[in-house]
Amino acid sequence: MKGISLLLTAVTIFTSAFAHSAQETENALAAVNLFSLGFNGFVAKKMPQQLIYEKALSDHSAVTLFQKVLGASDATPEAKAYAACGLWEKRAPERIALKKEDAALRVTLLTGDTLRQEPLERVIENIRLHGCR
């Protein structure tokens, strides 16, 4: 009986830590302020924002996480773009739904060593058509 109690305690602790980690990843992704995929910047490298996205992509509940970020009123436009990429990568493009009030938000994109801004609606449409490569 004591062994079962210890096992249940260990499972509870592990589950709690795992859920906390997923929430931290979701919060970090929702706050990113730059959309960049691949090796970019003056010294070509993956940006920290992409590393957060990749961590979210590897989460067992990634589709749910990306849907939450895409629908969150406090998520940045860049986060919503990453969320759309994540849904596309997870083969769930039908779940990419952009709220009308988010369509005109500006996304800061880094391509190579060039920063530019585009409307979120255009970025999302490009993701739907071509993916995130």
Image (spheres, helix red, strand yellow):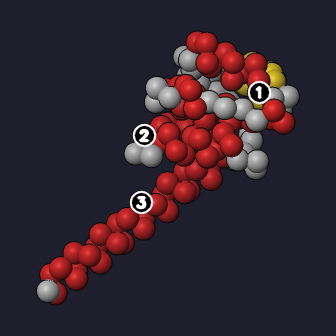
Q: Secondary structure at mark 3?
A: helix
Q: Residue furthest top?
A: 130
Q: Position of residue 86 (x, y in %)?
A: 54, 32
Q: Give the alpha-carbon distance from disc 1 to disc 3, as whole Å.
A: 31 Å
Tell me the tag on residue 18: 3
Q: Secondary structure at mark 1?
A: helix
> Which residue lies under the disc numbered 1?
120
In contact (CB < 8 Å): disc 2 and disc 3 = no
Identity, as a three-letter code, of the amino acid under mark 2: Ser
At 42% from the left edge and 68% from the top edge, which residue is drawn? 16
Tell me the tag on residue 44: none
At 81% from the left edge and 29% from the top edge, which residue is drawn? 103
Tell me the tag on residue 58: 2
At 54% from the left edge and 46% from the top edge, which residue is drawn? 65
Quadrant where the N terminus is found in the figure: bottom left
Q: Position of residue 91 (x, y in %)?
A: 46, 26
Q: Give the alpha-carbon distance from disc 1 to disc 2, as whole Å.
A: 24 Å
Identity, as a three-letter code, of the amino acid under mark 1: Leu
Q: Secondary structure at mark 2?
A: loop
Identity, as a three-letter code, of the amino acid under mark 3: Phe
| Left or right, residue 98 beside residue 26 | right
